[in-house]
Amino acid sequence: MNRTHFEKELEGLHYDVLKMGSLVEEMIANAIASLVNHDTELAQKVIDGDDRIDKMEVKIDNKCAKIIVTQQPIARDLRIVLTGLKIVTDLERMADYAVDIAKTTLRIAHQKYTKPLIDIPRMAEIVREMVKMSLDSYVHQDLDLARTIGEKDDIVDALYKQVFREPLTDMIEDPRNIDQASQFLFVARYLERIADHATNICEWVIFLDTGEHIDLN
């Protein structure tokens, strides 16, 4: 009976992590959409959703602590709990960056963009793919999928450098562009950080199965 109860607790933990991940995915997508479309209402929705994510993190942390205290898991069972703890920390940080992007939307919503947004949405799409990949690898315990995320991270890093150069050029050519261009630089940085956290999740998926920490960056 104890083992059956323990397995149900682990299943509940797994479900909670996936639910949180799904919400974070949605926040990232909405944050970028709000920026591209000057949608302040959608941006505010992202910002308002952060409290829910924070509460979910606390709930999952408490559940993990309870499992460790009452069940005293060892070996793979302990890695399952530790992985859950680490993943929700990464997810919470992703949500924070989504909120930062939404706040950027509110700051420059009244401004006409000096140029169409092309590279940032491209970068965001790859980042969203990485978040989905990381969660899929966790759901299916797919180590091969987890290991491929480094390739996506390299693409994001290259795009980040490209996105970084263009706003700097805009600032030099016309000082009136400094405020808007600097905001886009921040957004690119937030996306790059989300990609790093997605990579972290894949590293924890590998740890869950192998017990080894591997740097996928």
Image (cartoon, grey):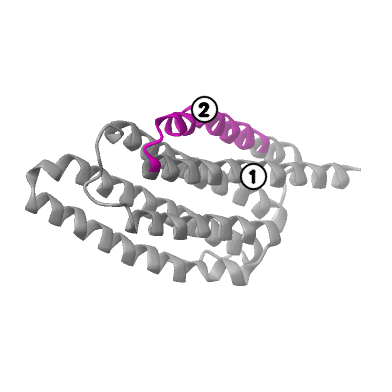
Q: Position of residue 25 (x, y in %)?
A: 54, 47
Q: Amino acid at mark 2?
A: Asp
Q: Is residue 27 above or below residue 83?
A: above
Residue 128, placed above or below residue 13: below
Which residue occupies 44% across, 44% down? 33
22 w.r.t. 54: above or below: below
Residue 2 - label: none
Q: Quadrant of the N terminus?
A: top right
Q: Nearer the viewer, mark 2 or mark 1?
A: 2
| Residue 191 percent coordinates (x, y) | 38, 51
Q: Residues within 10 Å of mark 1 (few under 14, many from 20)?
A: many
Q: Is residue 79 visible?
A: yes
Task: Give whichever of 172, 152 is nearer the camera.
Answer: 172
User: Residue 206: percent from the left, percent from the top?
Assistant: 59, 64
The count of marks equals 2
Q: Is residue 165 magenta?
A: no
User: What amino acid is found at the position of numbered circle 1 in the picture?
Assistant: Val
Where are the magenta residues, as a range? Answer: 37-63
Q: Which residue is mark 1?
A: 17
Label 2, label 1: how many angstroms apart (C-alpha)?
16 Å
Residue 51's mark? Answer: 2
Q: Position of residue 108 (x, y in %)?
A: 27, 35
Q: Earlier in the sequence, mark 2 or mark 1?
A: 1
